[in-house]
Amino acid sequence: MHPVLTLVAQRFALGLLLLFAASALIFAGTMILPGDVAQSILGQSATPEALENLRRELGLNEPPLQRYFSWLFNAMQGDLGTALTNGRDIADSLSTRLGNTLFLAFWAAVVSVPLAIFLGLLAVRYKDRWPDKLISAVTLASISIPEFLIGYVLMYFVSVRLGWFPSVAMVNSSMSLFERLNAIALPIAVLTLVVLAHMMRMTRAAILNVMQSAYIETAELKGLSSFKVIYRHALPNAIAPIVNVVMLNMAYLVVGVVVVEVVFVYPGMGQYLVDHVSKRDVPVVQACGLIFAAVYICLNMIADIVSILANPRLRHPK
Amino acid sequence: MKNIPLSALVGLFFTGAYFLMAIFAPLIAPYGVGEVVGDVWEPMSSTYLLGTDNIGRDLLSRMIYGGRTTIFIATAGTVLSFVIGSILGFFAAVVGGWMDQVLSRFVDLIMSIPTLIFALVVLSVTPVTIPVLIVVMGLLDSTRVYRLARAVAVDISVMDYVEAARLRGEKTAWIIFREILPNALSPLVAEMGLRFIFMVLFVSTLSFLGLGVQPPEADWGGIVKENKEGIVYGIPAALIPAFAIATLAISVNLVADWVLNRTTSLKGGRG
Amino acid sequence: MSDPMLKVRDLKIGATIYPPGEKPRDIEIVHGVSFDLERGKVLGLIGESGAGKSTIGLASMAYGRGGVELTGGEVWVNGRDILKSRPGDIRALRGAEVTYVSQSAAASFNPAKKIMEQVIEAAVEQKKFSRRDAEERARVLFAKLGLPDPENIGDRYPHQVSGGQLQRCMTALALCPQPDLVVFDEPTTALDVTTQIDVLMAIKEAIKDTGVAALYITHDLAVVAQVSDDIMVLRMGEMVEYGPVDQIINAPQEDYTKALVSVRSIDHEEKAPTSEPVLKVEGISARYAGLAHDVLSNVSVELHPGQTLAVVGESGSGKSTLARVITGLLPQRSGQITFAGRALSPDLAGRSREDLRELQMIYQMADTAMNPRQTVGTIIGRPLEFYFGMKGAEKQKRIIELLDEIELGEKFIDRYPAELSGGQKQRVCIARALAAKPKLIICDEVTSALDPLVADGILKLLLNLQKVEDVAYLFITHDLATVRAISDTIAVMYQGNVQRYGSKTDVLSPPFDDYTDLLLSSVPHMRLGWLEEVVVNRKMQSGGN
């Protein structure tokens, strides 16, 4: 087998292993307390009957290892169990919400990725001049600002004061694509601002790293125009790090989505998760945690696989 | 103390101001933290400098007390995460072998789950109190400190001067404290600033989601949550704590950036 | 008579430096240099680091590397002043009229593109040849430069060929567009000595065959003497001496040039072995964890008190591994080391403090061998404290004695390593080793990172200290001139074996085995015509190039 395929297969297997271990960790995370989970869910004032009911419902009377494997096995077949709070099937409630979350994340990515790469290139082009300094100052600031501040500032000024977009991002299945996009315009803007700084900074660093290589000097000393230097010599080597940057930030975006959904009351998975954490609905929290972790691990895995595929030393071994 | 750039001075000034405010909160705050003194969402006035909140408490007083809680939790979390992360990181780097492997792979695993999500999972079964928050945040964040501390220590421990100390017959403790630590300190201090910011944002986010500091206790994220309904009616009360979080974070960031730059210029001393 | 191909007049070059914690400031690094280069001639630019030689070379392409600015003077190429040319004209000049060969071909080739693509790029781009003709020309050049399989080597990626081969590909890249001038910037410095000679010969013949003019930049006068017609000696951005190669080598006028010519001519009387060796290495084999073969196999050497054993070999010969085994950092798999009459434990942990004290080490990179957060006083004082329990005034007095011994003096006691020059740093490392009053010091390439004159100073110091302190040196080096300067006994290492071992006179006198012959003959001599003689006379071809 080609050595690159071996490496990719290895990385893929590692991803699966990680996912498996992460599921165990999430399951263990809900049993982190030495005491009784049922007690801590219902509080000190709970009656013994209620406690016993909850224990039965959660299967707490069975050994933990057995519980974990039956949970994992069911989850792999698409059965995420039922919610404690309303007795509904979790997989059913999740499917539309997961769709909504991915819809939001997708459009945020569509806006932020090209923008970040463009600004990153701009910062490199004007390195150490004012556009670069401005960009890095804004970056520094935006890393320090909580997502909900950006959310409320936009909501306050753009939506409430100017009345341009709705302040609450309600979507339902009867809306057209345009109506949906109009509804989520502000959340997209917030998510874009949240990931833009990181993505831009990392893109800038990745390109600068390539531009400082000796082979770029060689290309310049061949009398090539700056366009050709970048197009022929910098780009082929910069693509892998940039794709890597994008993937890592997509993973970051998946987490940013949680807060933004709460701010704009968007019916996605993040809000679903937060609601059920405060209601201490453990099966729902476990299911959501597993899905978030799976997306996160997959994106990181794709980032690694892209860098393996893009490495000429691995693609053309000696 | 000469040659401090303006940005770092500004950062130092505001960071200091926020910390002083947190320490002397009871002396500065005009009203009590839970004291209802006026109408709902009164505008800014000479009596209520920042106006009142969603049930008529003085917003300035709540901001001052809230800052105290936020800064306390973030500081305690940072200290915890640093103590655990750097001790384990140095230990792994110096001892090496299977110990290092086990620790590093475990940290990899924890970091494969987004921090916020993992915190939410744990907080769904634990009672949400301030000590629990500090422990959960500190432990989760210590993975990042571990990685940095280990990487820095590994970089230094392959230096010839560490090898020279080993060949001289120095004890492991001497190597860690006299050869490695002095050279690892600056990057770690800079990282400490960044970790502190992360803690402030983290606890604020949790409180904002209703899963952090619980009422009647005040903290900045919680104040945003209490007053967020006002935004839709054009009342900016929720923006004030959010703004405070941002300025604190930016100030610390400016200081950390300066420390980091100073470190790199020391390292690459050839100009 | 027509104008010279390259005419440089009063060239001034500046740069902005950013000292930590201070305001950036402008400095001048080349202060008005002038020279002419005729068509088909080779001018050698020689000087130590910081002399500004690379900067001058790149100025002939109107290029300033990393913030360097061409601030004044004139650079005439083919009759026009390129410092006054428009950017478009400069681009048309680069890669067409003037081309460049860098020190590190490995970094200068784009890892993502095939070699052929990069070699012909300038020629095609500058419309000097059609793609097909350029490829044909490249193959001819590959063959001329002695590359294996010249028809197909262009289809490989840079990482698929060796360092020496890539350096020749870089030369082909520079010659392919049929330029009028090639700038060679230390093209052989990064190569092993036996590889260097082949690349040097290839470059020399290629220059002769194509009739191109060349600027040949190097710090090694012996190398430049083989390829140049004229030589310009530079020091700190100023011209020291400029003349025909014969005059510079055989009748230098300036003191600095004389010093450069006579460098590496230190010699010392070989001492006879005494009765009992201080270090006895018997049948050592060693390998690194995870490797399936031995890096050292069955190595045996001896070293007598107050004498020097030079272990010489190229990269990969196992000479540094031998040092690691003796210091206990890499326990041997088999064999025995006896030190000062005692059997040494293979493992560092099993050695007594006395073993550690009497066996000291000096490193190649003095930069990383000293803790940047400790002062010179602390660095030298620690062994005194650690081994002899010295404190206060007694320690202070001894530190100052040691500083005097290494010719630095008391004023250095409170300085930090970053405030010292390369040679001073290495001296402090020597003092730290001496502080332990050792019987043996292992010197691992201690002069390789230094400029020749500074390296000479260090060697002289080491020889003097040996007389005074009666310490033995195990001297690891790749440089035969250093070996000649310092050794009493020599071990030539090749692929993990001791190839040749004996007293200096024996090892350096014929008859030679093939490898020693190759190694000895590859060391450039400060003599015209040496290169041609060697290539004709040697017995063995160098391997890994």
Image (cartoon, coloured by chain):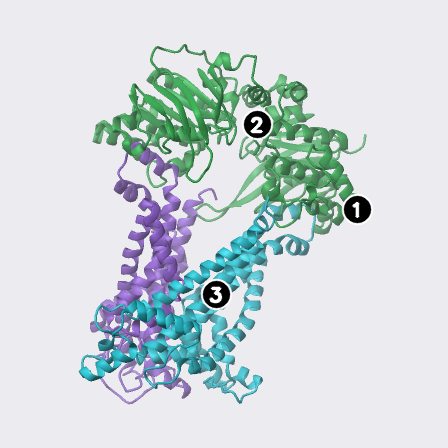
Chain A visual colour: cyan
Residue B136 position (above or below residue B45): above
Image quadrant where one finds the C terminus of chain C: top right
Image x and y of residue B267, in percent: 42, 45
Q: N-terminal of the two: label 2 or label 1?
A: 1
Q: Quadrant of residue B119?
A: bottom left
Chain appearing in green on the rendered image: C
Which amino acid does the dot numbered 2 rest on? Val
Q: Quadrant of residue A278?
A: bottom left
**Viewer-side label of 3, 2:** 3
- Reading the image, the residue beneath label 2 is C193
Disc 1 versus disc 3: distance between alpha carbons? Answer: 46 Å
Discs 1, 3: same chain:
no
Image quadrant where one finds the N terminus of chain C: top right
Chain appearing in purple on the rendered image: B
- Reading the image, the residue beneath label 3 is A298
Q: Residue at x 61, y 27 (%)?
A: C542
